[in-house]
Image: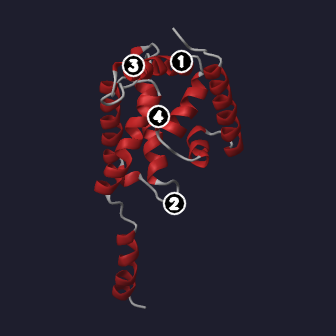
């Protein structure tokens, strides 16, 4: 095969490996934002950190390698670093503050939801930093245990075990009324 035919034969493969960044942004924006919210950042900080993570990813897009990690895993690694850098700059823990539920039907249901959010914030604040990180990745970012293992350096079964125990502990504390102010 001559050089021209070889090059034309390889070009379709190169084109199919290209990342559609518009699609990545649409799909991953909610995942990254939720990850930051579950980490305990307020809405404005979560929005800022989501923007920072996407900007860093865009600037490093030529270094992304599909064979090393999925785009989601790569973005979450960047997001984790952005969160760590932000917390280092603040040199303090960020208080948990979740959004209020949309348009409650009655004042009673609004009060109940607000109380449940307070209880959840208190329970999550009582977790170790590692447990909070795993909860944020699993339920905030919605990633798999395998992806969490890749991001954190833990074994996949270890991630599952820690999450299982953490959720069981949270449920038990919730049922006994723990975390109330």
Give the label, 3 or 2, closer to the camera: 3
Q: Which residue is mark 2?
A: 67
Q: Report, in whole angstroms, how far the alpha carbon at label 1 lies from the one at label 4.
A: 18 Å
Q: Residue at x 30, y 41 (%)?
A: 55
Circle 2 packing at 10 Å, graded few (<14), some (14-19), many (20+), is few
Q: Quadrant of residue 168?
A: top right
Q: Residue at x 46, y 41 (%)?
A: 76
Number of labelled discs?
A: 4
Q: Which residue is mark 4?
A: 80
- Does residue 127 lie above or below 18 as drawn? above
Q: Report, in whole angstroms, how far the alpha carbon at label 4 lies from the one at label 3.
A: 38 Å
Task: Mark 3 or mark 2: name the one nearer the start of the chain.
Answer: 2
Give the label, 1 or 2, closer to the camera: 1
Task: Mark 1 or mark 2: name the one nearer the start of the chain.
Answer: 2
Secondary element type, mark 1: helix
Q: Are marks 1 and 2 in contact (CB under 8 Å)?
A: no
Secondary element type, mark 3: helix
Q: Is residue 25 left or right of residue 122?
A: left
Q: Which residue is mark 1?
A: 125
Q: Which residue is mark 3?
A: 108
Coordinates of residue 40 in the picture (x, y in percent) = 44, 24
């Amino acid at each position: 095969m001559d050089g021209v035919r070889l090059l034309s034969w390889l070009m379709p493969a190169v084109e199919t490996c290209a990342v559609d960044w518009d699609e990545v942004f649409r799909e991953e924006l909610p995942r990254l934002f939720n990850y930051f919210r579950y980490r305990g950042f307020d809405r404005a900080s979560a929005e800022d950190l989501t923007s920072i993570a996407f900007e860093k990813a865009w600037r490093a897009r030529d270094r992304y390698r599909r064979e090393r990690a999925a785009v989601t895993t790569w973005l979450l690694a960047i997001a984790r670093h952005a969160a760590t850098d932000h917390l280092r700059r603040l040199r303090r823990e960020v208080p948990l503050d979740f959004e209020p539920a949309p348009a409650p039907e009655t004042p009673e249901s609004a009060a109940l939801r607000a109380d449940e959010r307070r209880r959840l914030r208190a329970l999550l604040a009582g977790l170790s930093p590692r447990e909070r990180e795993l909860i944020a990745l699993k339920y905030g970012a919605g990633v798999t245990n395998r992806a969490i293992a890749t991001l954190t350096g833990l074994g996949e079964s270890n991630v599952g075990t820690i999450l299982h125990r953490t959720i069981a502990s949270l449920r038990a504390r919730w049922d006994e009324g723990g975390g109330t102010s």
